[in-house]
Structure formats: structure tokens, C-alpha cells
Amino acid sequence: PPGFVESSCHSRIFWMKLNKLLLQGKFFQLEINDPYAGPVPLDEKLASRCGYVLSEDVWGNPVFRASVLGCHVANEADELFSLTVNIKVSSFSSMRAAVTYTYPMYCSYSSWASREIVCEENYMEVSVRTDVPAVSNDYTVAWMSALPETQNVAYQLWQLMFVSPSGRKTITVSDAVKLGYSFNNTLSRVYLRAPYHTNESDVSVVSGVNMNMVTSTSMYRQRWLLLLIDTTVSCPVGGISFTDTTLTWTVPSVIPTLVVQESTFLSKTILMGVDGQVIVHPEEKNYLLEHNETHIRITVPIGAKGGKLKSSISGGVYGVIYSIDLFLEHTWTDADWQTTKYTVIKSITTPFMPQIPTVTNNTLPEERLFNVAFGHFLPDVSLVAIAIGNVPFTLREAQHHGFKIYETPFSNTTKGFVLEVSFDDPYVLKEYVNRNETKYTLLVNYSMSVGPQMTPYYHSAEVECVIADIELPEAVGYCDEENLYLVIPTFGLHQYWNLYLGSKPLNRHVALTNGYLAATNSTHLILQIPLFAAGVIYEEVSFQKIKARFDVALRKVRTMETLQMFSVRCNFNSSAFIICHPDGTIMISAQMKTIPAIDMSKTKLRDSSCKPREYNEEHAFFKFHVTTCGTSVRFEGDHIIYENEISYEKETLPGQSIPTITRDPDYRLTVLCYYQAKETLVLGPFASDPATSPPFGSGTMVPRSNIAVYRRIRQALNVVSRVSKDESFMEFYEPNVAIIKRPVEPVFLEVELKDESPDAELYLENCWVTGSLDFNSTPRWNITVDG
């Protein structure tokens, strides 16, 4: 078919190339069509012995090369050569039903040098003109040493003598063929073809390059004629080196086994070629051809034109391999051989070079769009699937979902794959960070197909983008006569942040427990907080006036970091209240409506020295600490209760008998402050951070009729106290006996709980001495305060 075969003749070598595109999905074989014997199947042994090479070029096209001196080549006067090849193509590996294409090739070559050497991939070939001059006199001795061997040469028969480190070996041509050699003569030439690394060969190092060498003499005798021809051949088998960016091929300039008289050596021309084509100006293609007295060196940048980069996978790692088909032709003269043309054909492939793909984040925050470029890849790499957040998508599914995927070219003939994903896609991870930012994370797993073998390759990437796209809520506060109000936007609640009252989350349970009213609409939460509810902070308290504040903290859901404090602060006018401060200060505004009216200036606490700070006709304002003014303490459940009493000093009229006459009404008001037992009173100024401040206690004022209830609760415990005479607690004073002590003397007091209940515990909080049996009488002297 047209375009299937391409052939040419370069440097006395037949070149034939088959188009791989026309062989896809098919099998092929080559046969050499001998003009006398018919088709001969081409195999590996035949190829190296007969001067054939079957390989692939760097693009994967099958290439066949043959020496014009090869087997089955028709030779006309050592100038015109022809070779016919049968190309058999079949759809089956067994080659049944094969179609045969017969392709003749022709080559004209007349500019033979005295000696020509070809170093092919699988064989070495030397051809020598038979009318060579006599052996140099300087080396007569060496050549004459072969004469004893020639005495044994059969009449009119060629023989080969090999010289190797193991010694000399003389064999017939037919025996040499059995060893893989090929020897023959044409009208004017004799040639020897040898495979690499035979038993008769040797490896030597010439100018740092390993050379495979076959030292041989071809011998022929006919009547009075004795012909000795040097058919030594030496070819490089090393000399390749690589860097990350270049490959270098080095060949010795002078090969001692081929140039006996080095002083007469003269280099004439050095040519390089790529893919069978001579490169006249290597520098134009970025090749470097350089030579000196010892070396010829060709340096090729990896990726240069004429070669081919191919993707590869090794151990799950993506990389590239660069291949190029080079040849070198070196012509020189010397005194022995006049002219030698030395041709080396070399296919060079670099080792695997890892090329870790890069992920370039071209994300557009202002468009809320991930733009991720993944590369660089050679054209032989395809993207077949992706996974976003571990959810797999084929390319069709990805496009249907809304992901945008397309290829993008790069300047160095590579390509990349661009993926665009919206920040708002459900498969994008979202995390609230800092104060008002969201971190968007795109997790991508790429599934690739690499090379003609479609080797799978996988690569994962993680791309992040943080943008300030969250607006922190702002609360609005206001008050009425009895309540404080906070109106808070509900956006982000429980998703990004929560509300906290002190250290506790402000949830529905806490709100109900504390007496708050909570209502929500589509956009806001409305909190109603009674003035005297738990959690209210009293900044200033004076006669009939309270400055109160209510704080709610906005904290992150995950880290508990406080972002905002929502506060509402108002002044209230109140005629009656009791406030129990965290530091143990109690403030009371007592309203006393009696008939007849009493003089509020004469009201007092248990300690009669504790008078009101301010008063008017109906109100009295007291401020005192729980450790003063005769305040008592008791435990009840999980609360500590501090108790005092506001009373009125009656004015009496003197009479004739014990009964007292008074116009003033009997008025007593019990004051109670409840604190959680696990909380500690702060003795000192308020804490500056409301989130860490202890809570206010809750207070109540109880009319006199209820006092007995609390006293009965307190008296239910069987507590006995005694005073010891010294620290040994061995001798005690009798009860109800007056004890006289100076202020500087210690008092040794023992308090014992006689209650048998396992739930009862004794805490000695306050202990004082009074002048009478009534422990509420005044004056009183404290022995212990607050434990």
C-alpha cells in the first residue's frame, strides 16, 4: 500500500522503514528473497552472520538494514547491488492467511576505500581491497611469524587465523560459519563479518572506551600464490555517558589495532548523522561534534530534534526516556592502508529519568474557583479519570457534574491538564479558620494512561485556598424596665460558632434554667434576660439604681476560641432588690411598707452596728460582706447559703410593769444569698474577663414567718463543740461556764458532728463568740472566718 515502505541507500547500507500505522493490530515477518534459493526467513542468527539488522526507530517504525556485502545480495562488479525482501503481514500471530509484499531495493556504491569497517548493532564487518600493497617492512617479522601457519593452508582454500589472549586458532571458512562468522570475497574485495563477544574476540580499553576486537588474518594459497590479508576489526561497545540534560557518545580517534603506524595516521573527515541522514551542520540542531587527537565526541541535548522522548513508569514513578539513532563516519589515512572508512551505527537510549509532575495552583479567589494545572507530560500521556475527595469520576461524568477539564500546551512541547472546580462544589472540603476566613481544600487523584502500552499512573494532589468570605455577626442590645435583650444573627450558629455564657454553652436548657426567654425567626435569635436572672453582671449598684450588663461570648465550634463578646448594658431603677456579688458582697434595697410607717434610718442587720448606707421614707440600702454584720452560713444540697436579717429597733415607752409599750410595728426581713458550693468567692475586685469571672449568687428576701423553716433545717444536724484547756485536747472546760481569755491568747476549739448519716459532712466555715447564748446576738468576735 502507498506509504507502507520507505527505502534508501546510505553509506553502502540498504535502509528500509515500514510505517507502523499500517501495521497496527497486525503481525509481520521478513524474508530475504535469494535469487537462486528463494525466500529465506530472517532470524537473529542469520541477521548477525549475513549483515542484517531488524529493529525499530525511535518512533516505533520497524527498520531493516542490510550491508551491500550481505548474504543474498546481488553484486554487479562491486558497484551495483540489489536485494529483494518479502514482507509478510497477517492478522494472526501464527502468520496464517498472510499477505506478502515483495519489495526490491537497489544501491549504487563505487567509492570504496582500501579498507572499510562497519560497526552495526549486532555485527562487525571489515572489507579489504585485494590489491593491497605489500606488507610494511617494519612489521615483516610479525607477519612472517604467520608463515608456519600458512604452510598448512589447503591448496586453493581460504582459511582464517584468529589471535586472541587464549592463543592462535586456524579454522576453515565453513567452520567459521558455524561459529557465527561470515567470510567471502567479491571481484575486488575480501570481507569478514563477526558477531560481538565471540570466543575469538577480546575487549580492550582504548582512550577510556571499551572496544570489542577480533584480530584475524585471512589466508589463501594457489600454486605459487600465497595471499595474507589482515581482516582485523574493532568496534566500540561503550563510550556512552549521560547527564540530566545531555547524552554523550565517545569514540577513540585512533584505534591501535587498526592503525599500526600511528605516526602516519591522518584524520581526513568526520561526519555524524541521525536516523541515517548526514547532519552537515550539527550546531544548527544543537548537536555538538568535537574531536581531538584521542577522541571524537558527539553531545546531544536530551529532547533534541531527531530523537524522541517517551514517557515511562518505573516503580509507580512517572519519567521519560530519550532515544536517538546516531551514526559516525570517520575517514583516515595511514602508511599501511592508505584510506580507511570507519562507520559506527549506534542507537542510544537514556536510562529512566524521573520527572515528577508538578501541580500549579492558579486558583482565582475572587471568582471562587479552583484552577489547577497538572503537568508537564509528553504527548503520549492521557488523562482518563479523576477522583475528587475520593469520589471517582470518568471524564464524561466529571464534565456532566460541572467540573471543567481541558489540556493546555507548554512551551517545551509538553502539555498539562487543567481542572476547574467551584469552591461551592459539595466535594470541596470547607473549614472555618481564623476569625472570618474559610479554608477550601480540593483533594484530587489523577488517573493517567502512559505510552503506547497504556501503563496506568496515579498521582494525588491537595490544593488549598483561604479567603475572607465570612462576616462575623453583630448583635444589637436594648432594655425595658425589667429585662435586657440581645438580638443575634443566626447565620453560622452551630456551623462556625456557638454562643457561650461564661464557660457553658448557651443552649435551650441553660436558657430555661436561668429564666431566659429565647425566640428565633428566619434570621435572628432574640434573648430576653430578666434583670435579676443568673448571668447578669451588676457593674454599679446604688440606692434604687442598678447598672447591669449581660455578656454572651461567640466562640469557634472546634477550637473554642472567643471571637466576639456580645454585650448589652443598661441602667435600671428598682425599689427592691438583693444582689449577691461573686466576691461575697451583698447589696440590698429593702422596701418596708408598714402601718404605721417606720423610720428607715433605724433599721439594722444582726450586728446593730451595720446600718443602711442610704434610705428614704420607704427604702433602706445595705451593703455588707458575708463575713460581717452577723451573717451566718449553712450548706444545703449543692449550695452555700449566707443569711442575715434586717430588723427595726422599736421605740418603747416606759411602763410600771415588765411589758413594753410601743407604737412601732414588728418588722423583720430575712436576707438569703445562695452560691454554688463548687464556686469560690473572689475576695477582691471583679475579674477583668467576664468569661472567667465566678457567677453572681442568687438572692431572696424572706418575711419573718419563714425564718423558722430555715432554722429547723440548720438545727437538724447534731453538732457538739468544746473548748480545750490546751493544745493536747485532753482536758475541756465545762459547758455553760464563762471562759476568760486575753485577746492574744489562743483558743483551742473542737467541733464534732454526731450525726450518723453517711451523707453528712462537717465544714467549719465561720466561728464566733457572743456575749449571750443567742448566737445571733451582738457584739460578736470572730474566731475563724471562711474556713
Image: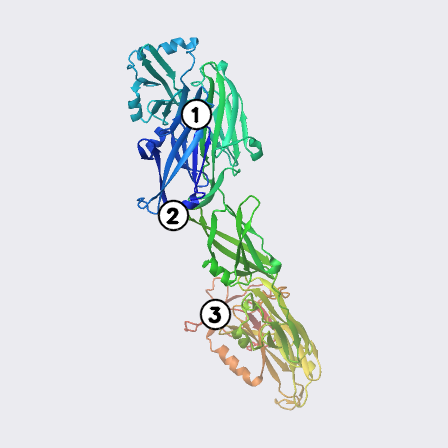
* Foreground disc of the pair 2, 3: 2
Amino acid tagged 1: Glu
- Using the numbered discs, state the Cα–Cα distance from disc 2 to disc 1 in whole angstroms: 40 Å
Q: Residue at x 42, y 15 (%)?
A: 132
Q: Earlier in the sequence, mark 2 or mark 1?
A: 2
Residue at which label 2 appears: 25
Q: Position of residue 39 (x, y in %)?
A: 32, 35
Q: Position of residue 467 (x, y in %)?
A: 60, 59
Q: Residue furthest right?
A: 616
Task: Write down the residue under mark 1.
Answer: 79
Residue 433 place in picture, x, y as percent: 57, 59
Relative to 371, residue 685 above or below: below
Decide: few, some or many residues near mark 2? Use Cα within 10 Å; few <14, some 14-19, many ≥20. few
Direction from residue 657 to residue 174 in the image, left or right: left
How far is the residue under mark 3 from the one under mark 1?
128 Å
Amino acid on which the number 3 mark rests in the picture = Leu
Q: CA distance from mark 2 to mark 3?
A: 98 Å
